[in-house]
Structures are given as structure tokens and as C-alpha cells.
């Protein structure tokens, strides 16, 4: 099964309050200089949550599948990562 097919089996209840944030945007510029583009958080995210636009990280937290790979991949520990509030976020859909 392809990753796109697996992602289709997920259901997401959007939380109006973002559960992902960049702590210090200037660290992302440093990361781009050291690691190149795409940065590790962009490269590792299976749901395309992060994108690099005009020398700035844009976070589409609504797409997050809550795998946590971005916070592990970030070499600067620059991603504030929490689970969405209770009852919101990702839900598995079977069948």
C-alpha cells in the first residue's frame, strides 16, 4: 500500500488551536544554510506539513498525522510539538 493510500484511511478533526509551532524562525534559516533545502523536518514529514516559502517555514498543522518525526529530525530542537486537544486531531478509520 502506498503512503498516499494509507493517509487516506486517516480522519482528522481540526483543532482551531495549532499543536505545532516553530520556536525560533531564525533557527530555520540557519538550518537551511547548514543542511540545505529541504530541511530535515520537511524531508521527513509524510504529510507535507512543512514547506519552505520565501526563506520561511510554513506550518500546515491541519495535515499533521501526529507521527512526531519532525521534532526528532529537527537538529535545533526548534519545533514545539504537542498532541491536539482531547478529541481532536487524527483518528484512524477502518474498512
Image (cartoon, rainbow, N blue to C red):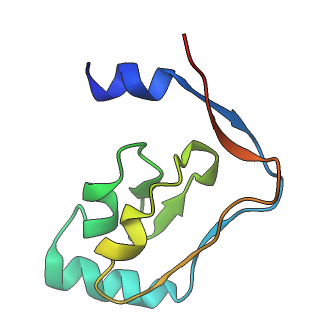
Q: Is residue 36 left or right of residue 31?
A: left
At a point 25% along the width and 77% down the height, the residue shown is 32
Residue 15 % position (x, y): 80, 51
**Where's the C terminus, which quadrant?**
top right
> In the current view of this chain or complex, which residue is farthest to the top?
95
> In the current view of this chain or complex, which residue is farthest to the left?
35
Q: Is residue 83 left or right of residue 94?
A: right
Residue 66 % position (x, y): 53, 54
Residue 54 higher or lower than 78, as above or below: above
Residue 12 higher or lower than 69, as above or below: above
Which residue is nearer to you in this view: 20 or 56?
A: 20
Residue 73 higher or lower than 84, as above or below: below
Image quadrant where residue 14 sits: top right
Residue 12 % position (x, y): 68, 35
At a point 16% along the width and 72% down the height, the residue shown is 36
At a point 25% along the width and 56% down the height, the residue shown is 43
Amino acid at each position: 500500500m502506498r503512503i498516499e493510500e494509507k493517509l487516506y484511511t486517516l480522519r482528522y478533526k481540526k483543532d482551531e488551536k495549532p499543536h505545532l509551532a516553530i520556536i525560533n524562525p531564525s533557527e530555520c534559516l540557519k538550518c537551511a544554510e547548514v543542511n540545505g533545502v529541504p530541511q530535515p523536518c520537511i524531508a521527513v514529514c509524510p504529510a507535507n506539513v512543512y514547506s519552505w516559502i520565501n526563506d520561511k517555514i510554513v506550518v500546515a498543522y491541519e495535515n499533521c498525522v501526529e507521527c512526531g518525526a519532525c521534532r526528532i529530525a529537527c537538529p535545533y530542537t526548534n519545533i514545539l510539538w504537542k498532541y491536539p486537544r482531547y478529541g481532536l486531531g487524527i483518528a484512524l478509520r477502518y474498512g
